[in-house]
Image (tube, grey):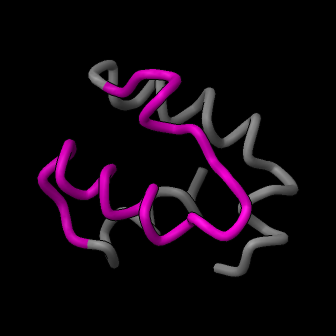
Amino acid sequence: MNSIELTGNWEEQKGKLKQKFAALTENDLLFTEGKKEEMIGKLQIKLGITKEELLKIIESI
């Protein structure tokens, strides 16, 4: 997944992630250009899943 994919549909993906994982907050899903890896790391910790699992979930949304 590259930054274009993440930013292009991010608002839509973010809403779907919040529906799927009620524990996620707006701050958890705050995407700042150049800090994608940091955000993904925080989500991994909060959800207790691997990076690969998280990317598969995001890609499937």
Q: Is residue 24 above or below residue 6?
A: above
**Residue furthest left in the image:** 48
Q: So how many labels did they put on this image?
A: 0
Q: For the point 18% across and 53% down, which residue is it?
A: 45
State the extent of the magenta-drawn residues as a range: 24-50
Q: Quadrant of residue 34?
A: bottom right
Q: Is residue 15 above or below residue 49?
A: above
Judged left or right of residue 25, residue 42 is left
Q: Quadrant of the N terminus?
A: bottom right
Where does the image place residue 13, in percent across and percent down from the top left?
66, 42
Q: For the point 47% across and 26% down, which residue is it?
A: 18
Q: For the point 73% across and 46% down, which residue is it?
A: 10
**In magenta stretch: residue 38:** yes
Where does the image place residue 22, in percent across and percent down from the top left?
33, 19
Judged left or right of residue 49, residue 18 is right
Judged left or right of residue 15, residue 42 is left
Where does the image place residue 61, in percent across and percent down from the top left?
60, 50
Where does the image place residue 23, in percent across and percent down from the top left?
27, 22
User: Toward the viewer: 3 or 50?
Assistant: 3
